[in-house]
Image (tube, grey):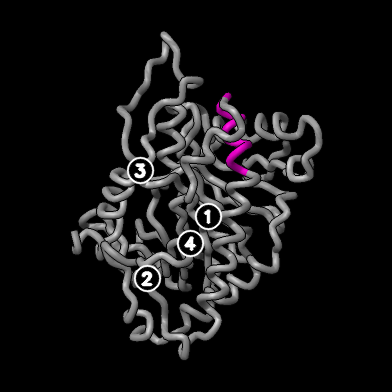
Amino acid sequence: MTTTAAHVPVVDLTDHCAGRPGALTRTAAEIGDALRTVGFVSIVGHGVDWDLVTEIYDWAARYHALPLDAKLGHPLSGSSMGYNPMGGESHEEGRPSSLNAAFFMARPGSARNRWPDDEALPGFREACERYFLAMDRFCHERLLPLYAVAFGMEPDFFQRRFDPSLATLRISHYPPIPARDGQFGIDPHTDAGFMTLLPSNPVDGLWIKPDVADGPGWFEVHQEPQSFVVNAGDMLRRWTNDRFLSTLHRVTNRAGVDRYAIPFFFDPRVDTIVECLPTCTDDNDPPHYEPVRYGDYLRNFMRRNYAPIRADA
């Protein structure tokens, strides 16, 4: 494991993906160290076809270039995925709104998905579904066993809790708009779920703030080429009794060009009861949280953070 200048640990998955002896245990230990100390890890040697990533970045630009009326025809709501326009994210009263717009997609085939007309953007849906399924498969086959072993559990511990996963693809646009004081592309926040994967971006803008003593404070992440920066969310922190971090992060676009991002949120089934793992508690460190059903936690998170969903509720 090495560290970039931005202090995000870099873990190479080549041996793990090849199934070499000892690689699962060794790589899991490196992942665990990163999540305990930073809450973010950069993974290389992952084996994901990078052409899929490049393709979705291209579709992100084409989608967000659609006329606003075409995107407002499939809005994000309490019952459906879709488009969340600029200003659609919640913010504290008196603070300016975040400078981003985003399209949300659930699992292919979900009745919650809403799409632009095929005539307006032919091929968009199929490309999103290809990318979604590739990332879902990668998380299941490569990352879940690493996480389970990092937590002292059997490699298949998480499989049934993510069968199927409650995964979400978000296709975000951060236009080159000057920010006011206290305004960001996305406000400082932690993610609600288990893990989030961000492929390396040609335009920087991600900042993180690890919650560790004598930490560096806020710093900008400069990603490795063809890597994924993976961060833990609140559910992972609850499952591990605060031993693994759910780190504050934000986005600021100061590049003077459009910035697109395609985070993939990989979360457990809605009926999963998240409670402290037996390997993460002892007589001197009892569970810090009551068990929670993930679907209930996520519903409350979405209502707090997205105005259209709160309005529906």
The mark closer to the camera, 3 or 4, is 3
Give whichever of discs 1 and 3 has the lower sequence position.
1
Question: Which residue matches tag 4?
Answer: 169
- Is 221 a magenta residue? no
Image height check: is 150 above or below 230? above
Give whichever of discs 3 and 4 has the lower sequence position.
4
Along the line of sight, the residue nearer the viewer: 303 or 144: 144
- Is 147 a magenta residue? yes
The mark closer to the camera, 2 or 1, is 2
Q: CA distance from mark 3 to mark 4?
A: 20 Å
User: Type of residue at label 3?
Assistant: Asp
User: Type of residue at label 2?
Assistant: Gly
Question: Which residue matches tag 2?
Answer: 82
Q: CA distance from mark 2 to mark 1?
A: 24 Å
Give whichever of discs 3 and 2 has the lower sequence position.
2
Left or right, residue 200 beside residue 80: right
User: Type of residue at label 1?
Assistant: Leu
Span highlighted in magenta in the image: 143-152
